[in-house]
Amino acid sequence: MKDPPETRKSVPARQIAAVVVGNALEFYDFLTYSFFAVYIGRTFFPSSDPSASLLASLATFGAGFVMRPIGALVIGRMGDRLGRKPAMILSFWLMGVAISGLALTPSRAMIGVAAPLLAVFFRMLQGFALGGEVGPTTAFLLEVAPPERRGFYTAFQFWSQNLSILISGLVGFGLANTLTAQQLQDFGWRIAFLAGAVIVPFGLTMRRSLPETFHLTVAVKRQHISLRPYLPLAAIGLLLLASGTIGNYILAYMTTYAIATLHMPGSVGFAATIVVGLCGVLLDLPSGMLSDRFGRKPTMLIPSVLLLGCILPAFYVISHYRTMITLLAATAVLSSLLSLSAGPTVIWITESLPAAIRSGSVAVIYAVSISTFGGTTQYVITWLMKATGNPLAPAWYWTAALIIGIAAMCAVRESAPRKISIAPVVLPLVVEGDVA
């Protein structure tokens, strides 16, 4: 007989692969939109003013975030009522429909106003699906892991997201170096979306093979748990995620920033995206292991303080020298520090909640924060740069958000099992909520 998840020393690679492949593909589909925002704007929102076209495209990008809290409520809570597995399958299936629909929607020149309406619809369906993805997958990763290695296994959540950024950047870089600018505009961006859609059948097959973790880890599946004791945790979690997601989406904006603001070739912009994804892929899992060893709080706090001192100088160098070397080097520094600090925030939130409400609560906290701040970040910084003419606007916006995030980190009380065994936690709700 196999050991239960609580005492298991390792997790079968196929289970991690099933979550990673599905999660990475969903984020690939969602983030690819931001990387190709310039081209999508010209296709569905043509205008004589390039900035107006880009803003319309980014507004549609933000529309996907409107649906994320709704998806979190519906699919995230489904993960607490029916199990993590069916919730993960549903969210993945919906994302497949959305990404295929967006890739195949004709341009406005062909079908008129129906084109932008369809683009908005499919974008909102993407948001609904992704809103319900994070809670069940994160809960699954934590529940399937041994307690002393929760940080490492849960870090696959962010690792898979950065894997999607890396793959999307590689696809964009390859297309930008293979196709002409006009071909990239006419059909190149659609190829990037369809490349993700092709993987959907394989992802569904892999997810159907997953075991269910919820009934293995909760004695009374339908127990009633009051949410009120966890409201302080949710508030801190919202601030932590708000700070991190603003940074993530500013880095995801680097491709558009390089093309539209710095007027660099498309290949250079996509190279920056590759750097962002590569740094995350290399550092997310070590960050999770460090949080297991030294605790969630120092692992998120120390890199964040270093990052605070690097944002403005990095953007100053990028905007003043405007070379490929400065863009990639500065992006690498910012991405590395953010990758080291971001993962432990989600780990802390997830393991601080009881399993009976874990999927839905993580999904809602994550979705509300991402929708409020991630969904508006790229639109806000584009508007700020247009209004002020200052290419450093993204840096100032990120700096303000990070200061708030660091303040929230200072309020966090340790939740890592190893650290709890050494020193008591000040917030009892963190320990009491840590029900595997």
Image (cartoon, helix red, strand yellow):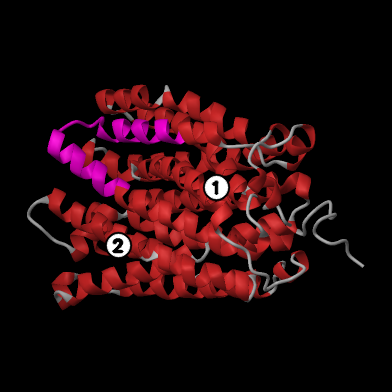
- Give the percent coordinates (x, y) of residue 64: 34, 63
Query: Tag 2 or tag 1, which sits nearer the N-term?
Result: 2
Q: Main secondary structure of the magenta part?
A: helix
What range is drawn magenta here? 377-405
* Amino acid carrying mark 2 in the image: Ala
Q: Is residue 362 above or below residue 104?
A: above
**Residue that numbered label 1 is attached to:** 233
**Residue that numbered label 2 is attached to:** 63
Front-lying residue, 27 or 263: 27
* Residue 383 is covered by the magenta coloring: yes
Is any atom of residue 34 visible in this view?
yes
Q: Residue furthest right?
A: 1
* Amino acid carrying mark 1 in the image: Leu
Front-lying residue, 85 or 255: 85
Front-lying residue, 78 or 379: 78
Would you identify the image quadrant in which residue 239 lies? top left
Question: Mark 1: few, some, or many residues within 10 Å (few <14, many ≥20)?
Answer: many
Front-lying residue, 136 or 254: 136
- Give the percent coordinates (x, y) of residue 209: 70, 73
Residue, x 19% and y 44% (percent of image)?
383
Is any atom of residue 204 visible in this view?
no
In which quadrant of the rendered image does the N terminus lie?
Answer: bottom right
Q: Which mark is residue 341?
A: none
Element under label 2? helix
Residue, x 19% and y 52% (percent of image)?
55
**198 left or right, relative to 390:** right
Q: Is residue 277 above or below residue 323?
A: below
**4 left or right, relative to 16:** right
- Give the percent coordinates (x, y) of residue 428: 67, 44
In which quadrant of the rendered image does the C terminus lie?
Answer: bottom right
Total numbered badges shown on the rendered structure: 2
Element under label 1? helix
